[in-house]
Amino acid sequence: MMNNAITYDLIAALPEIFVLCMAMVVLLVSLFLSARTLYISYILTQVTLLGAAFITVSTHIPAVGYAFNGMFVDDPLSDILKLMIYLGTSMVLVYSRSYIALRGMYRGEFFALVLFAMLGMMIMVSGQHFLTLYMGLELLSLCLYSLVALDRDNPRSTEAAMKYFVLGALASGMLLYGMSMIYGATGALELSQINAALVNGMADRSVLILGLVFVVAGVAFKLGAVPFQMWLPDVYHGAPTAVTLLVGSVPKFAAFAFVIRLLIQGLQVLTVDWQGMLIVMAVLSISIGNITAIAQTNLKRMLAYSTISHIGFLLFGFLSGSMNGYISSMFYISAYVLMTLGGFGMILLLSRKGFEAENLDDFKGLNQRSPWYAFLMLLLMFSMAGVPPTLGFYAKFTVLQAALQAGFVSLVIFAVLMAAVGAFYYLRIVKLMYFDEPQDHAPITPSPDMALVLGINGMAILILGLMPQRLMELCAYAVAHSLQ
Amino acid sequence: MFESNILSLSIWVPILAGILVLATGNDARAGLTRWIALLGSIAGFLMTLPLYTRFDYADGGFQFQEGYNWIPSFNIHYHLGVDGIAVPLILLTSFTTMIVVLASWEVIQKRVAQYMAAFLIMSGLMIGVFSALDGILFYVFWEAMLIPMFLVIGIWGGPNRVYATIKFFLYTLLGSLLMLVAFIYLFHQSNSFEIIDYYMLPLPLSVQLFIFFAFFMAFAVKIPMWPVHTWLPDAHVEAPTGGSVVLAAIMLKLGAYGFLRFAMPIAPDAAHYLATPMIILSLIAVVYIAFVALAQQDMKKLIAYSSISHMGFVTLGLFIFNPLGMEGGVVQMISHGFISGAMFLCVGVLYDRMHSRQIADYGGVVNTMPTFAAFAVLFAMANAGLPGTSGFVGEFMVILAAVQENFWYAFLAATTLILGAAYTLWMVKRVFFGAVGNSHVAELQDLNKREFVILGVLALMVLGFGLYPQPITELTHATVEQLLTHLAQSKIPG
C-alpha cells in the first residue's frame, strides 16, 4: 500500500523529475563540449522537451490526482498547460538560437537555465500547497533573473536584472507575508484545506482579507498588472531579446495557473473580495498599458506596455468569477503567448550580428524586403489589436462575453473603447511595414528551422482565428475537469 | 453542390482568386497578374448571377440558405442566406470588382499583385457581409474587410494617405466594437448568434435603445451620417481610384444594409422611438452637406460630400417606415453605387492624365476629350437626379414617401434636386466647358478603348435602371413588405 502511494507520487511528478535530471545532464555535458560541438546541448534540450511531452501525454488521465500528501496535483489543467509550456519553450529555443550564438551567449548555462526555469513553471502549474507554489515561483524567478543578466557586460541588461531581482524579491516577500496571514487565519497551507476552512467559516475574516490583499499584490506583480507593472518595460527592454522572448511568453502560463490555484482553488469563497481588486487592476492595466504604448518608439517597450494591457484583458476572465470566465482566461493566455512568441520572433528575425531590430523604424518597408514576413507581422499585429479573422479577436471575444455574462456591462464598454485606442499603435507598425520605404536593405536570411516555425506560428494566428473551436474545447476540457 | 452553395462560392471564389494572384503575381509579370485578377473577378461575378436568375420573387424571407456548425462552444454557425435587399447589393459588389480591376489596369504599376488581390479578397468579404445570417460571422467579415481597404489607401494612396487610412480604420473599428458588445449581449439573452433568433427576441425598450445605439455607432459611421462623416472626405481624397470606387459604391451601402438587417428589425420599438432624430440627421446630411459640397475645390472631395448627401436619402427612406420609402432607399443605394463609382472613375481618368484633382486646374476639357465629356456630363446629370437616369428614381420614391409622412421632410429633401444640380453642374461647367484652360488641358488624349468600355457599361446601367427600375423593385418588394410587417409589431414583452 505504502509502495503504491510512492509509485503514484513518482508517476504524477515524472515529467518534473525527467526535466530536472535532463537539466543537470545538459549542464554537465556542456562542460565537455567545445564551441563547435555545443549544438549537442541544444539538441539535448529539445529532446528533453519532446521526452517530457511524451511522458505528460502518456501519463495523462482525465481526472484529478493528488500526490505527495496533497502538495502536488496532476490534473488535466496541469497536463495541458505543461504541454503548452513545452511547445512554447521549444519555440523560444528555435527563435533564439542564432541570436544568442551571434552574441556570445550560446553556452551550456543558457540551456540549463531555461530548463530549470521551465521546471519552476511546471511546479507552479502543479502546485497545490503554498510551499510548492512558492518553490516553483522562486525557481522560475531566480532562473529568469540570471537569464536577464546573461549578457553580463551589457550595462542595460545588468541594470534590468537588478531591477527585476529587487522588485521580484519584494513581491515574493509580499506573497509570503500574505500566505502566512492566510495560514494564520485558516491553519492550513494546502489549498483544499484552506478552501474547506473558509467554507466552514472558521477563519478570522479581517486577517484573511489582509492576507488576501498581499497575495493578490504578489500575484499581480508576477503578472505585470498595474499598479505593479513598473519592472516590466525595463526588463523587456533591457534583457537580450532572446530572453525577453522567454520572459514575456511561457511564464504567463505558469502565472495563469498560479492565479487559478491560489484565488480560485484556494480562496474561491472570497471571490467577492478579490473580484473588486481585479476590477481595479484590470481597468488600470488596460488604460495605462494602451495609452503608454502609443508613446513608445522602441518595439520591445511597446510590446511590454501591450503586455500590460493584455494582462488587463486576461483579468476580465478571472473577475467574471465563473467557469466560463476561467476557460476564457485560459484561451486568452494561450492566444497571448502565441502572439508574443511571434512578435518577439520577428524582432529576432530582423536582428543580426551587431544590430538589434528593436526600434519601430527598423520595420520600415518590410513589405518590400520580404512580403511574406511583413504579412506574418501584419497578422500578429491585427491579432494583438483583436481584429478578426485572427486568433486575437476570439481571445478578446471570449473574455468580454464572460465579463458581460457576469453583468459588467460598463466595464466591457470601457474595455472595447480602450481596445480601439490600442489598435492605433499596432496599426502604426503595419503602417511602417507597408506604407514606408525601407531604411535597411540587408537581406533577411533566417535558418530553415526558424523560417519554418515562424511561418507556422504566424499562420496559426490566422488558422486558429478561422477555426478556434479546437483550442476552445481544449481549454474548456482542461478547466472543467480540474475545478470542481 | 452548386445548387446549395451559391453563396459560399460567391464569397470564396474571389478570395481564393486573390490568394492565387498573391501567390503567382509579381511586378515583373504584371500583365499575367492582371489577367489572372480579371479572370478571377469575372468568375466571381458569374458565381453571383444565379442569385438573380434563381431568386424566388414571392418569398420575402431568406433564400439560398446554407448552415454549418462553426464554433459550437458559443453556438456560432457558418450560416448564409440572402433576401431581396441583399441580392442586388451582392450583384453590385461583384460587378464593381470587375470594373475596379479593369480600371486599375495601367494606373497601378507598383505591387500590382497585392493591389489586385486586395480588391478580390475585399469583394469576397463584402459579399460575406451581405449574406451572413450569424452575428459573429457577420462581424468577422465586417472587420476583416477593413484590413485590405486600410492597405489599399495606405499603400497606393495620395500624399496624406497615412492620416486618412488610420482615421478610416479607427473610426470604423470604434463603432464596430460597440456592435460586438451588442451581439454578445443578445447572445446571453437568447443563447444564439442567429440573426433570425434575434428578430424573435422580446426586449424591453431601454435595452432596445442601448442595442440600437450600439448598432447606430457601427452603421452610422459607415454610411456615413452627419456628424460622424468626417473620415469619408479624407479617405476618398487619398484613396486610389479603385479604392474610392469600392468605398463609395459598396462600403457606404454596408451601413445602410446594417440598419435594415440588424438595427431596425432587432430593436423595432427603438427604431420607431428614434425615427424623428434619425430623419433629422438624414435631412442635415441631405441639405447641409450639399452646401458643403458646393464649396469644394477638389473634385474628389466634392463627390465624397455628394455621396454623404445622397446616402442621407437612403436613411431618410428607411426611417419613414413605409414601403415606398424603403424601396426607394434600396433603389437609391444601387443607383448611387453605379453613379458614384462612375463619377470617381471619371475623376480617375482626368487624374491619370493631369495628376491633379483641383477644379481650378481644368477648363474646357470638352474641346480635347469630347467622348469623355459626354460620359461625364451624363453621370453628372444622373448625380443631380435628372429624370431618365437611375439617380432620379430612388430620390423621387423617397420624396414621395416623405410627402405622405410630413410635408416639411419632403420639402427639405427636395431641395437636394436644386442643390445637387447646383454643385454638380457648376463643377461640370468649370471643368469641361468654356475655353481650353491651360496648355496641359490642350494636350489631353481622349478615352482609350478600355476606359470607353468601362464608362460605357456604367452609362448603360445608369440609363437602364433610370428607365426601367423594375428589376430592383421586384427583387426587393416582398422582402420590404415582410420587413415592414415585422417592424410594425412591438417587441416589448408584456
Image (cartoon, grey):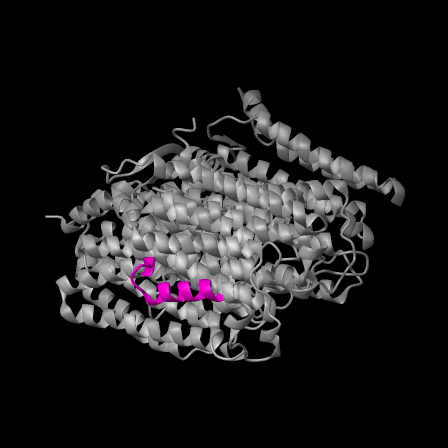
Residue beneath the point at 69% across and 59% down: A239
Q: Quadrant of the C terminus of chain A?
A: top left
Q: Quadrant of residue B283?
A: bottom left
**A271 or A56: which is nearer to us?**
A56
Image location of residue B359, percent across then percent down: 49, 77
**Left or right: B66 as drawn, with respect to A305:** left
**Left or right: A276 as drawn, with respect to B14:** left
In the image, residue A388 sits, relative to residue A294, either above or below, namely: above
Is B382 colored magenta in this rendering? yes
Is B58 colored magenta in this rendering? no
Please, which residue is most extreme toward the left here?
Answer: B494
Residue beneath the point at 14% across and 69% down: B407
**A234 or B189: which is nearer to us?**
B189
Residue beneath the point at 59% across and 75% down: B442
Q: What type of secondary structure mainly makes up the magenta span?
A: helix
User: Bounds of the magenta span?
Assistant: B373-391
**A476 or B95: which is nearer to us?**
B95
Residue beneath the point at 55% across and 58% down: B152
Image location of residue B252, percent across then percent down: 39, 59
Image location of residue A238, percent across then percent down: 69, 63
**Left or right: B23 as drawn, with respect to B40:** right
Number of marks present in the image shown:
0
Image location of residue A247, percent across then percent down: 63, 53
